[in-house]
Image (cartoon, coloured by chain):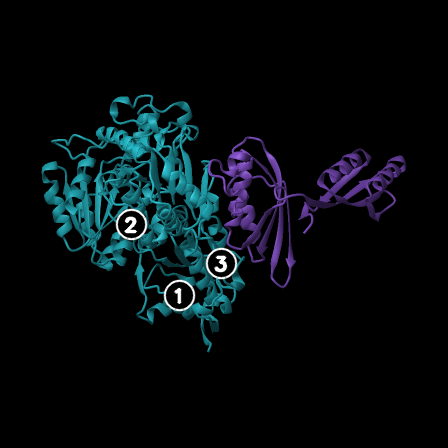
């Protein structure tokens, strides 16, 4: 039985069929028919944001905290162009999104009509795929296919551009089951011969390390479970990228901490000195590898990735396994168990002894300051006071983001949302809104810097309107801290435009929106102030005034390998050579 | 063979080690891409090349299966072996792409290009142009008393050679289709 309906009704029906409960959006002329349909139903809640970029980041927060695709609805022209940063962010971090944009009616396309933009043209390089639907008869099937493409294989954002006349016209609705998914079916099972080769390597390795990434999180909770089982059973050390935190618990005894440019000493030295590197769902990003020709020189490398283009993109690997992390880990465990659960115990014992030596350096050690709050201290206290709670953390981008990754511990996947690949300042606040919408009863904290936070501060309105008790934990150093740090290291301490002048009074700002504002500047008051934030039932802006010139360590300077880490202030002078200076 | 054409069964070395993937030597490859003929698909392919900084030496595209709406894009590109592998993998993940074949790596192939050349001249030069066209088996498809349009098919090298000879004889315009290619045998 087919059902005739308007294109606008189809959109809402297709979203319902796909199990969507929440849409983040902003109305405008070219999506009015869809908004009219949303008005007339109660199955899908619409979260009205204050800026389209925030709609996309909120959908990312929703997607990353639930594992489901995030859905966005915005209008044509500026609505679509404002979504571009969010789309690029989601593409870089492989976050599944379905973004629906209105478009001027088909007969006006190409005429430079009011609020017309070539949306599919503009978003082609920043989506996994996009569609312009010119015929209502094809609309429902296209939306179903959009969900399939967003989730299948390496997830990513997709966009469906819907002209206004297509929303008004009627056609038969195609239900989800009958919609063709097309030929797009990425390979999920890994090649068994390479998997066996990797198991052989696991059995013999004297100094192995697991290097895991966002692919484990994207593969789903089962993949994290399998990873934990494999790590516990083999006894191998494990480190993770920024994107993969939580896949293996921070309290696990094999956990080395995050690796990379601001990763832990023991994690980076383990990467440098290992003889077997098992990359599980990470992509050898430049924040991880440092200088390529000196990256982990003595190791054989295995790389598990669902995207064939990730293999050998920057680092040549010896054992490439194309497939879904969950499927491949399951096969590795099966083969390894069947072959007798062997590992090189003697080698591993020596390896762990070396790692223990590195751990003794205690690279995150810092001296709390009497008079002013050091940012590390603020995060250490936040961690202590929220540990064990049902907690979701988002961040903006910069020093605070790295400190959050270093000082907060993540026990489960999908609990940590940060802009890794694109490094989008302004990501964290809307993402916290998306996570809170998905988990209304949970504690959602956005660890922010004052400069990043101001980039999407208009979302206070959204938080108040929808009664979302998101906690904005702002480490306020009145500086663009990471920019300032680089200017100190690279540009002769000429701090060009890297300070935040004319900052608002954050307490008054919170009150102006109808939220609670807390300011804290004395370390002695910090615990009480954090507890006040946690206990308040509603959104809070926490203005934590911290040490202004703190640098983020450890740090691998640009253009240097992992074993040339800087641990603290003493060695920073001329640490970055002229070759490193051109890198970001 | 896996999707990347990595040799199976080697535990010590990957096929990439054997082929020295990260060498600096640039190679020219002809890649055939079978795509769904939907709006914007060519822009996706071209955008991939410009966005990631790959070269396009030549590109041809036409629908080859009108019922199935499939188009064949033939791209001649130059890059190091690693870049060529990346190009193929990146092409493979474009959603409307059905198949990617590296005709250069997968065995021998037939490559042909068609060109039209306008040569204007009188007297000796005109006679010489006609004589050379005969040697190259180029056909005259248009003629005035002062000009010819020649049609030539062959490898790009043959077209280059013919064009070089025509230049001093009054070559005024040239139109080339770019390379179309098929693998030899079944």
In the image, the chain rendered in cyan is: A
- Look at discs 3 and 2 and give the one toward the viewer: 2
Number of marks = 3
- Look at discs 1 and 3 and give the one toward the viewer: 3
Q: Position of residue A346 (x, y in %)?
A: 30, 33
A445 left or right, relative to B5? left
Label 2 lies in what chain? A
Q: Colour of chain B?
A: purple
Q: Position of residue B42 (x, y in %)?
A: 57, 51
Q: Earlier in the sequence, mark 3 or mark 2?
A: 3
Q: Residues within 10 Å of mark 1 (few under 14, many from 20)?
A: some
Q: Is residue A426 visible?
A: no
Q: Earlier in the sequence, mark 1 or mark 2?
A: 1
Q: Secondary structure beneath disc 3?
A: strand
Report the residue at 54% width, 64% height from top: A107
Q: Which mark is residue A131?
A: 3
How far apart in space, not on screen, are marks 3 and 2 (Cα)?
32 Å
- Which residue in the protein does label 1 denote? A32
Q: Secondary structure beneath disc 2?
A: loop
- Look at discs 1 and 2 and give the one toward the viewer: 2
Q: Are marks 1 and 3 in contact (CB under 8 Å)?
A: no
Q: Is residue A295 above or below residue B36?
A: above
- Which residue in the protein does label 2 denote? A413
Q: Is residue A34 visible?
A: yes
Report the residue at 49% width, 68% height from top: A136
Q: Is residue B20 above or below residue A73?
A: above
Q: Which mark is residue A185?
A: none
């Amino acid at each position: 039985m087919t059902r005739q309906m308007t294109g606008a009704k189809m959109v809402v029906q297709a979203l319902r069929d796909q199990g969507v409960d929440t849409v983040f959006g902003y109305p405008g002329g070219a999506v009015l028919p869809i908004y009219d349909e949303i008005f007339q139903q109660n199955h899908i809640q619409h979260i009205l944001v204050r800026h389209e970029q925030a709609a996309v980041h909120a959908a990312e927060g929703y997607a990353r905290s639930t594992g489901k695709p995030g859905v966005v609805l915005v209008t044509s022209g500026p609505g679509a162009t404002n979504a571009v940063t969010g789309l690029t962010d989601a593409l870089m971090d492989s976050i599944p999104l379905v973004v629906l944009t209105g478009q001027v009616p088909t007969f006006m396309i190409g005429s430079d009509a009011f609020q017309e933009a070539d949306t599919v043209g503009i978003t082609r390089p920043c989506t996994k795929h996009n569609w312009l639907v010119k015929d209502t008869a094809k609309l429902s099937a296209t939306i179903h296919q959009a969900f399939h493409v967003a989730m299948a294989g390496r997830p990513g954002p997709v966009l469906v551009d819907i002209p206004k006349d297509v929303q008004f016209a009627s056609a038969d609705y195609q239900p989800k089951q009958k919609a063709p998914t097309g030929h797009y079916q990425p390979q999920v099972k890994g090649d068994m011969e390479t998997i066996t080769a990797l198991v052989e390597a696991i059995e013999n390795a004297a100094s192995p390390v697991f290097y895991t990434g966002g692919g484990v999180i994207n593969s789903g909770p089962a993949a994290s479970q399998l990873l934990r089982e494999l790590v516990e059973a083999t006894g191998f050390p494990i480190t993770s990228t920024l994107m993969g935190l939580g896949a293996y618990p921070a309290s696990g005894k094999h956990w080395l901490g995050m690796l990379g440019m601001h990763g832990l000493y023991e994690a980076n030295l383990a990467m440098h000195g290992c003889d077997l590197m098992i990359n599980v769902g990470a992509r050898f990003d430049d924040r991880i590898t440092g200088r390529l020709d000196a990256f982990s020189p003595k190791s054989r490398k295995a790389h598990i990735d669902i995207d064939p283009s990730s293999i050998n993109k920057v680092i040549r690997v010896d054992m490439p396994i194309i497939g879904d992390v969950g499927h491949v880990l399951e096969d590795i465990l099966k083969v390894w168990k069947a072959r007798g659960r062997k590992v090189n115990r003697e080698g591993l014992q020596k390896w762990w002894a070396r790692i223990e030596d590195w751990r003794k350096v205690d690279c995150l050690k810092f001296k709390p300051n009497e008079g002013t709050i050091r940012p590390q201290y603020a995060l250490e206290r936040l961690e202590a006071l929220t540990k064990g709670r049902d907690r979701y953390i988002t961040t903006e981008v910069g020093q605070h983001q790295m400190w959050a990754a270093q000082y907060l511990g993540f026990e489960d996947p999908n609990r940590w949302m940060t802009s890794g690949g694109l490094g989008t300042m302004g990501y964290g606040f809307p993402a916290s809104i998306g996570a809170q919408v998905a988990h209304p009863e949970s504690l959602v904290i956005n660890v922010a810097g004052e400069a990043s936070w101001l980039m999407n501060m208009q979302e206070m309105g959204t938080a108040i309107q929808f009664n979302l008790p998101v906690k904005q934990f702002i480490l306020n150093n009145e500086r663009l801290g990471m920019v300032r740090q680089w200017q100190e290291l690279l540009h002769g301490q000429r701090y060009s435009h890297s300070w935040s002048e004319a900052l608002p009074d954050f307490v008054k700002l919170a009150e102006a929106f109808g939220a609670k504002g807390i300011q804290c500047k004395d370390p002695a008051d910090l615990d009480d102030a954090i507890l006040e934030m946690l206990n308040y039932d509603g959104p809070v802006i926490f203005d934590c005034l911290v040490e202004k010139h703190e640098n983020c360590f450890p740090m691998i300077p640009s253009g240097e390998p992992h074993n040339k880490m800087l641990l603290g202030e003493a060695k920073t002078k001329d640490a970055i050579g002229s070759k490193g200076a051109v890198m970001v | 063979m896996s999707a990347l054409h990595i040799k199976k069964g080697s535990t010590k070395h990957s096929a990439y080690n054997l082929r020295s993937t990260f060498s600096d030597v640039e190679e020219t490859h002809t890649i055939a891409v079978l795509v769904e003929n939907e709006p914007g698909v060519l822009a996706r392919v071209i955008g991939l090349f410009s966005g990631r900084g790959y070269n396009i030496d030549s590109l041809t595209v036409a629908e080859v299966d009108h019922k199935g709406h499939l188009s064949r894009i033939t791209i001649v590109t130059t890059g190091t072996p690693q870049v060529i592998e990346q190009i193929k993998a990146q092409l493979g993940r474009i959603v409307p792409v059905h198949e990617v074949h590296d005709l250069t790596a997968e065995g021998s192939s037939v490559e042909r290009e068609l060109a039209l050349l306008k040569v204007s001249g009188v007297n000796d030069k005109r006679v010489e142009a006609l004589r050379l066209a005969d040697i190259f088996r180029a056909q005259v498809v248009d003629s005035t008393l002062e000009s010819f349009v020649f049609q030539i098919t062959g490898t790009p090298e043959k077209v280059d050679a013919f064009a070089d000879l025509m230049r001093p004889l009054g070559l005024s315009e040239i139109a080339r289709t770019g390379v179309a290619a098929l693998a030899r045998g079944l």
